[in-house]
Every structure is written in C-alpha cells, then in structure tokens.
Image (tube, helix red, strand yellow):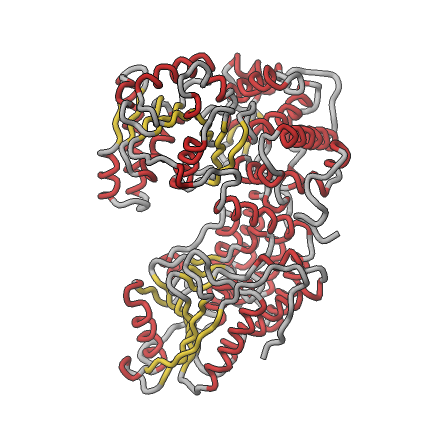
Amino acid sequence: MATAITLPEGAPEEVITQSLVRDVDLTPFGFKGSLALITLDNGLDHTRPNTLGPQSLMALDAAITDAAARTPAAIAIIGKPFIFAAGADLSGLAFLNTREQAVAIGKLGHDVFRRLDEIGIPTFAFVNGLALGGGLEIALHCNYRTLATTAFTALPEVFLGLVPGWGGATILPKLIGPERAVQVIIGNSLNNNTMMKAKDALALGVVDAVYEPTDFLEKSVSFAARILNGAQKIERKDYSADPAWDVALSAGRTTALKKYGGAEMASPTKALELIKAAKTNSRGAGFDAEDQALADLTMSDPLRASLYAFNVIQKKRKKVEGAPKPALARKVARVGVVGAGLMASQLALLLLRNLKCPVVMTDIDQVRADKGVAWVKAELTKLVEKKRMSAESAARLALLISGSADQNVFADSDFVIEAIFEELTLKQELFKKLEKIVGPECVLATNTSSLSVQAMSEGLEHPERVVGFHFFNPVAVMPLLEIARTTHTDDATTATAVSIGKELKKTMIICKDAPGFVVNRLLTRFMGEITDAVDEGTDPQVADNAMRSIGFPMSPFELLGLVGPGVAVHVAETLHANLGPRYRISPTMQAMVKEGVKTFYLKNDDGTFSANPAALALVHKGDAPSTAEQVRLRALKALAEEARMMLDEGVVSSPAEIDLCMLMGAGWPMHLGGILPYLDREGISDSVCGQRFHAPGIASLPQ
C-alpha cells in the first residue's frame, strides 16, 4: 500500500482523477472468469485530461486494492472517453520546497504503479486515448497493452526538464531495447515533443495490439481473454546482452547536445544515465534511481524555469490577454492575400487549410499570381504524399484557391492580408486602393515585421479596421502570431483577428503598434550587440558563440542565415529611424547585402558548417575586440534595457507576454523559463533596470 503525502501550502487544489472499478465477465470472450476494469476519470470532458497528483495516485492505489479483492482473473485499466491520462499534475511541483518532498512524490508514483506488475495476476492497460508521461508509465507497469488507433502517446519529460520518473526510464529500455528507448525518451521529446501515433507505438513494441476506437474496449477485452486462455502469446525479448547500448546512448547524447547548441543539460543527461543503468539494474533499483534523479531535477532552477515557461504557454494558448469579447468577431467566409511570393503563398496555404474557405491571391501580373497558386497546390499534393491529408480533402481545398492580377477580386472578401515588399508608401497606397474595393466590414491586415501599422492607415476613411497580423517564418511551423493594435483599431477588428488566429491554431499576443512589435524589436537589439562586437574587432565566431553555454539551439549568425542579411538590415534601419541610435546599422551587414552574401556559414558535405570566406572578407575590422563573456553580458544587458522600455511604453501588458513571445517566436530555451526570468536570476535585471521583472521564486527555486 502507498503512503499518502500532502503538497505544501499554497499549491493549487488538485483536480482529482478518480479510479472506478467494475467487473467484466470474460465468458462471452472464451475465458471462464472475470476481469476487474479500473476506469480513470476526473469527471470533466476531454478538454481537461486526467492528470495524476497525490490524491489521484491514492485513488488509483485504493482501486487496485478493490480490484484485487474481487479475485478476478486479471486487472485492466482504461481512461475516460478520448483520454487515458496526460501524466503527472505538474501544477504542484513548483510549490515543493524540500528535496524530501520531491523524493516522496517520485516514490508515491512508483509504489502505486509497481503494484500493477507485482500483484500476482495478469494486468492490462487499455489505452483508449491520449497517454503522456505518467499516463504511459501506468501502461508500462502493466503486463500487456492495447492502444486505440486514434490515440497518441509520448514520454515528454526531458523536454520539460524532467525524466520519465515513474518507471519509464527503467522499464522502456528493458521492453523495447536501448535504441528505441532513446528515440522515445530523448529523440521524440527533444523534437518539439513528437508524439507516437498508434502504428509507431506498435512498431516500436511499446504496445502489443492496436484497435479501432469504435469497438476498442470489446476488442481489448477479447485480447485479454486470449492471453488468459493461452490462445495468444506475446514474446518479450531480453535486451540485457544487446550490443547496441553504447551506440544508442552516444546517439542520444549527440541529439541532446545538438538541441541545446552544444551545452550539456541536466534532464537528458540524467535520462541517459537511467537508460544505461536499466541494462543491469533490477526494476526496484531502477525505480530508486529514478526517485533520486527526479528529486535532483525538481529542486533545480532549470526545472522551475521550464514549468514556468510551460504554464505561460498553456495559459496564453487558452486565453489571449486583452482580447475583446469573442462575440464581437465578424464572420470570415472569404479571404484575400495581397502578394504571391513565398511569404504570401505560405499565408494563403495556412489560411486555406484552416479556414477552409475561398482564398484569392493577387500580384502585379497574372503570371506571378498563378505561380503563387501553383505553389499552394503543390504543397497540398506534398501533404497528401506524406499522408497528412487525404486526397479528397486536398482536391476540395485546391478548388478554393485562386489568383488574379486584378485586386477587384477582393470585393466580397471579409479579411484581406498584405505581404508585399516592406516599403511604407507602397503599403499606404495599397490600403487606400483596397478601401475603395472591399466592403465596409472587411478587416485589412498587414504582415509587416517592423513598419508602423498606424502609418499605413493614415488617410483612410476607416482606419479602425486596420490591424497588424505578424507571422514568423516558416509560417506553418512557428506558433506565434503578434496582433498589433493601432490607436484606431476597434474591438470588432481585433476580435476578428483573434478569432482567425485561433482557427489557425496560433499562440497570440495583442501588442501596441510599436516599431518591431515584440520579437523583432528584442532580436534586432540583441543581434545588434553581436554584430557591433564583430565590427569592433571581435572574432566573428567568438561573438557568435557567446550565448552557446546557456543552451541556444541556434547562434545569432545561424539565425541570420535563415532571416537573410537584407531583411535584418531593413529591420535595423527601421528601428534605428524610430527608436534611435541604440539600434545601429552594421557596416558588415550592409556590405553583405551589397555583395549579395547571404550567410556567415556554409554547409559542408559531412553536414557540419564552416565560416563563409566571402562573409569573413566583408567583416568591418575594428581594433577593440571583446571576449565571449563581454559579448554575452552586453547582449543580455541590452535585452534587459529594451524589455524594460517596452513594458514602460505599454507595448505589452505584462512580463509574461514578453517571455511568451521570445519562447514561441525566437526559440528562447524552455529550460531558461523565458528571457526575463533568466535576466532576473543572472542579476542583470537589477543591475540594468534597478528592479526585477518577476517576483523572487518565479521560474526559480523558492527564495
């Protein structure tokens, strides 16, 4: 029996997942006897998945005791509709203030879950829906597992700064072998939390059978009966002598180092240690090691920072701060995209796939417009080939995309977004022309990255319907959408923009129409300090790698290769003109643009990168070089100064929104908790601004 524990005072009240027991007669399935079926259910719908806090674990413990007392032939566990269990209730972890509490949480999970393997009768997990982290670990403790074809599974802990600490890091390598375990625990987790589809989980050996959801329980019970009567056997391989352990562990370490820009992070390192130990450890010894690893990580700043970042992202996905009432949003049944270049085409594809309404593109001539439409249709074909869309769906969408050289096709559009060249006068002329074409309630949006949205609306009869709608490249992948309100933008326009953003499945912030909005303003200031250091005489690779130690997956100059020097210089010039001399124009960047040199690095045949001689030849050679630490400090101090200015100016309403933007739009590492908590912990906020951005204990251990 497990020992109850209580979370510290101040922790949020747990949404308890109850464990309900009932008997299932196996006679109709060919076995004389019964199965005790435990159903996990928190009493809420699928939008609030089952989670596992201390009280939920005790409820499961009691249910296992109840089930065993019924003397069944076997015990099985299933979830509520669409959901098995989404893992540990992470909301209480940030309130643990002693290592003993952290060990107790790990031990409680082990004490409950291990009963499923040690109870003396066969146990089954009928994974009918989403199973993440601790949810999947419940299933791993069972002797057999079935999975619904529609269910996704994963062990995402490493991404959050944890390890699969309720048995996953010990059981999975023994079950499916080291290579596959490293793929699931390290590779998938660090690849933006990739989840396993049912066919993948079956192929990897994580589950034993896969069934359609329509008769999933019936088929799973039948599977259990066949196991019990001996009609079906599942062979388990002994991987203790597998020669692949060292290779698999080395591959996992390489994956982690690549993810964090060469920096060694605690969670993947500890996960790999646990996987390695699983080769020779007994289950009990492995579980004890998991308890200690979990406690070490829980009582660390990176884990608290990751939890803060995770909670900020989850909260902002659900509710956009400052958004008007959704009822004010206008219906959008037809969309226009001005431009047919790559960015405009990406926007058209995203709008088409998610809104599933007619989308019309325009450009200066029919050839260009047709090229944009052809690109969209080609991408739909690729999605079909990758089995991410049915051929029928792609065919329907292809009928909804069209192109024209005549902007009068926008006459009946409800939402028109422009993605033309970043020149203010061109955009002003465009909006004046569009205003005469579109209906009185049509929203006019701009995907500008740095220009004034308000300036674009000057001279319009209805400037209240103009809004900034800024995506990041690549549009389909980057999750952030900045919605910029001018002093004229009305609530109906903003509500419509937010409604569309939700349909596009983007994480949004509403910001003031200020130069560069949030991400580009901060990134340009940050990049400026790096390029300034180079222009002053710092070795480019020293300057570029100055931030590597904190786990950035991409260096500033690697990012420059994606953005392009031309775009970077244009944004810097815009911000220099609007925000002053702290945004300097780099002569090195100007020279790269002039000479058509697009990147600082060239990819070698073996996949590595080397400095581009053409770029090095253009470096402005100053005589005041800096060390890597000096570059790091100047860049971070500049970020602190700029963030403080942005908050004082009301660009966004809270520090958390700046953190969200940098996490979702700039790849700021999760384990740092966002940019502002990191600056707080480093003492830079106090040094530069005379105050912290967050209260002590936010995204860090209690202070």
Pick the residue in front: 487 or 91. Answer: 487
Residue 430 is drawn in which quadrant? top left
Q: Is residue 541 left or right of residue 504?
A: right
The quarter of the rendered structure image containing the N terminus is bottom right
Relative to 377, is 148 above or below?
A: below
Percent across and percent down for residue 6 are 64, 68
Relative to 75, is 180 above or below?
A: above
Q: Residue at x 43, y 56 (%)?
A: 47
Q: Residue at x 35, y 80 (%)?
A: 24
Relative to 304, is 553 above or below?
A: above
**Can residue 242 be seen by looking at this rendering?**
no
Q: Is residue 20 left or right of residue 367?
A: right
Q: Residue at x 39, y 36 (%)?
A: 329
Percent across and percent down for residue 437 are 30, 19
Pick the residue in front: 410 or 572. Answer: 410
Count numbered badges in the picture: 0
**Can residue 133 be seen by looking at this rendering?**
yes
Pick the residue in front: 514 or 259. Answer: 514
Q: Is residue 328 left or right of residue 275?
A: left
Residue 620 is drawn in which quadrant? top right
